[in-house]
Amino acid sequence: MKSENFDVLIHIESNTLSDELISFNNKLSTEIIAERVAQNFPQCKIFYSIPANYNGTLLNKKDIFIREGNEDVPFWKNLFEKTESKNIAIIKADSAFFDPEILREMIEVHVKYLAEFTYSENLPEGFACEIISTDLMENIPDIKEKTLPLSQVIKSNINLFDVELFYKEPDIREKRLSFRVSNPRDKAIMERILSLKQGTPSYSEIKEIIDNNPEILFLSPSYIEIEICGSCDLDCIFCYRKSLKKEHPMMEISTFQKILSEMKAYNLPYTLSLGGSGEPLMHPQFYSMLSIACGDPLVERIIIETNGIYADTNFKTFLQKSESQKISVIINNNALDKDSYIRLHGADRYDTVFKNITSLAELNKDGERIYLQIMKINETDEIQKGEQRSYLDRYYDFWESQKFPIILQKQNIYLGKIKDRRYSDLSPLKRIPCWHLQRDLYILADGTVSFCKQDIDGDFSRGNITNESLEDILKNQKQSFIEGYKFRFPVNPDCSKCDEWYTFNF
């Protein structure tokens, strides 16, 4: 391996306008990266790629390349021309745990196989990097995607280039972790790791540190599902409402406000989902609650799960407001026509729902905001009489023609509380720690914090947010997560029977 044939580009993301998002442990992560590169690859030149609106200290550096847009093909052609580099390794500027050994191994692979582009899919962000050869720039055909980031162009036309995929043990993709200090949650975990180990850990040490100290992964919830309404006009064949001990009430707006207020103590962004056993749009104060959530800076995304019956003109008007851009909508609609709607949803509301869905379609013009969700069950996969294709295939063809992204939802049978209509078992063979116990919080309409989403009546609740603090409630959940991480599954509810542990939310 000849490191003198390699240079390094430290890449500042387009949303990084100052040094705040690249600061870690009282130092800029760019300085940390540059020092490690200089120590381990003294022959490498170090360049910086920064967005045009960046206003931090890196502006004083030499060898900076300012981007007006993406790191697109013209940008890279100019960079290779100006630097006369043979190969350039791209390192994200917020990668404070950058491991020189990984770069060394990637360079060896890149050289050995005469690659034009080398990258990794199993390494978490913050450890992974990419290597681009100048030869690749000469081989880019005349394709329309040239305005996209170069790595995206390569991956979408991967057969046109000599690409190497770098694999590194241990594979910790199951933990769904990244290590980038620009993300507040990543940064908090990285700080906890540093508190356990003197000096920056190598990648090979990360798994052992986490496995021996799983509590470092437990922060405040990143996904909170709030059941604001327990009522619904439908009687869907796959819904758990029939299994409830009693219909759930409407949530008091004061309870909703308390939840959001207590999350402020953690100062970490999270996703808020309005779902549960009922239809959220039926709550008489739905729009007041939604306005409160939209105005909370820690709520970075709002997901509304609705049956679409009340997603009318008023709903559409609210979604068009500038402060509502953080809202995404999932419409649970399994129907192709009125007959299938009645068969699957237990009521004749197809015309209303279809009208509302098609009206909302224009909100997807600037990005995906409105999703259609269909349940993956026997009734939606069968080939009906007189048809050549399955119901699911025809559903996709129809709704994709209407420009809707589709979510194919796995049926949750809630530990056997409802009839199992699944036509296949998609559960991984290897059990891993539960994602939901680590990241989720499920709150019923009366303020009860369920053990998890499987605890539909709150029989094994962690407390009630109306009269207990979120801090005390989370202490209980943290212990459940640690026990589950060590495969000592709780028995109430019986986590050993759950097959939702591997699923994850937006």
Image (tube, helix red, strand yellow):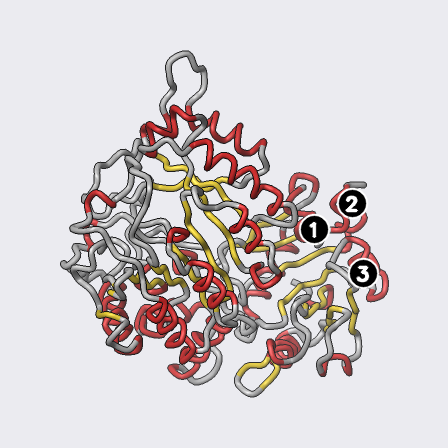
User: Does residue 247 lie above or below 35 as drawn?
Assistant: above
Vertical placement of residue 84 versus 136, above or below: below
Question: What amino acid is found at the position of numbered circle 1 in the picture?
Answer: Glu
Q: Residue at x 47, y 29 (%)?
A: 395
* Mark 2 → mark 1, Cα distance in angstroms: 9 Å
22 on left or right of 429: right
Q: Secondary structure at mark 2?
A: helix
- Say which residue appears at 29% left-offset and 73% top-offset: 474
x, y (%) of residue 498?
Answer: 23, 50
Q: Three-letter amino acid code at disc 2? A: Asn
Please tell me whether residue 137 is drawn above or below residue 38 in the rendered image.
above
Q: Quadrant of residue 239?
A: top left
Q: Give the residue displayed 60% in from the left and 47% down from the top.
A: 363
Label ID, residue 80: 3
Q: Which mark is residue 116?
A: 1
Secondary structure, mark 3, is helix
| Residue 187 in picture, x, y percent from top left | 49, 75
Residue 209 visible to the viewer: no
Counting from the top left corner in percent of width and height, residue 66 is at 79, 69
| Residue 267 in which image quadrant | bottom left
Residue 139: mark: 2
Towards the viewer: 2 or 27: 27
C-alpha distance separating marks 3 and 1: 13 Å
Image location of residue 403, percent across then percent down: 59, 37
Amino acid type, label 3 = Phe
